[in-house]
Image (tube, grey):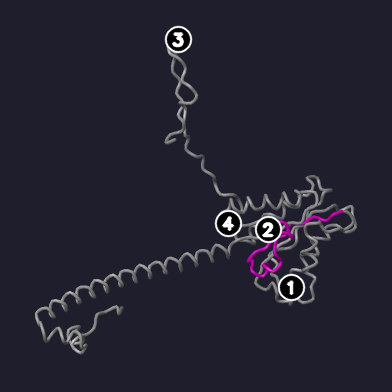
Amino acid sequence: DSKKVKGDLFKLLASENRFAAVMRRDPKHAQQLDDRLKTSVGEKNQLLQVLGAEDLQGQYHKLVEGLTDAKESGSSVTILYGSETGNAEEQAKNLLQDIRARGMKGTVSALDDFEVEELPNQKVVVVVISTCGLGEYPQNSKRTWMALQSPDLPMTWLSGVKFAVFGLGDSTYAQFCVAAAGFDVRLGELGGQRLLQRGVGDDRDEDRYFTGWEAWLPELWTALGAPSVPLVREIPTPSYKVTASPGKADSPPVPDDDIVPPGA
């Protein structure tokens, strides 16, 4: 199985009693056996070298794919929302669409649907959360919020994570956007790196919370290093070409079933 055939097989086998006996009885036949063995060993060795090269190439491709996945994972944005009436959820999902339109990768989920233990493994986390009533946290964020209060979490737990927070609320309430403030402060206490100042959307603004959102969003793109405007979307090539021609009274119309896309 060596990569290179070493030594003289005939001399090696001469020390083997069975082959030595054949050499003594019929030297010509022994030479023929030796030649056949050399051919067989050479072919096997060549095959092993080819397989080894293919395996090396395969391992190389796996390494490149792994590095590519790691690079893509590194630029991925994790969007987490806490929403009671659906406003924060809608903004979070719209943000994901904008992120993808700018050529970046991202995911979105409710805070309580995300495994808290995975937070330190994220590169960029964006929290979009509303405040309910008199300072209540949304139902789909309470479990995560309580988990982050654990005294067992070290102050360096999120040292490798960059984060940003946007809050939705109503400024007529004393606890305006308190949920967003809570997450913003706590993620920083756990070692997270704040990308930009916390954004707030006030339901009392002229355009409701969209006013604050539209002001905060360009700052987020700058902090992420993303384009400030979506990429140009080219109009796809039409599948059909329509031409007008005069009809004939004696020619029946073309059945709908005969109108199919090219290549269908």
Q: Please tell me whether mark 1 sits on a helix, a strand or a loop.
A: loop
The residue lying at 27 percent from left, 72 percent from top is 44
User: Amino acid type of disc 3?
Assistant: Ala
Give the answer, above or below, for where 194 lies relative to 4. Answer: above
The disc, 3 or 4, on the residue closer to the chain's N-terminal end is 4
Camera-near label (4 vs 2) is 2
The disc, 1 or 2, on the residue closer to the chain's N-terminal end is 2
Start and end of the magenta stretch? 109-132
The disc, 4 or 1, on the residue closer to the chain's N-terminal end is 4
Q: CA distance from mark 4 to mark 2?
A: 13 Å
| In-image side of 103 versus 239 (left or right) | right
Res. 104 mark: 4
Reading the image, the residue beneath label 2 is 79
Q: Position of residue 20 (x, y in %)?
A: 16, 87
Q: Quadrant of residue 226?
A: bottom right
Disc 2 crowd rating (10 Å Cα; few below 14, some 14-19, many 20+) is many
Disc 4 crowd rating (10 Å Cα; few below 14, some 14-19, many 20+) is some
Disc 1 crowd rating (10 Å Cα; few below 14, some 14-19, many 20+) is some
Q: Please tell me whether mark 2 sits on a helix, a strand or a loop.
A: strand
* Residue 255 painted magenta: no
The residue lying at 47 percent from left, 17 percent from top is 253
Res. 190 mark: 1
Q: Please tell me whether mark 3 sits on a helix, a strand or a loop.
A: loop
Reading the image, the residue beneath label 3 is 249
- As drawn, the residue found furthest toward the top would be 249
Q: Quadrant of residue 247?
A: top left
Q: CA distance from mark 4 to mark 1?
A: 26 Å
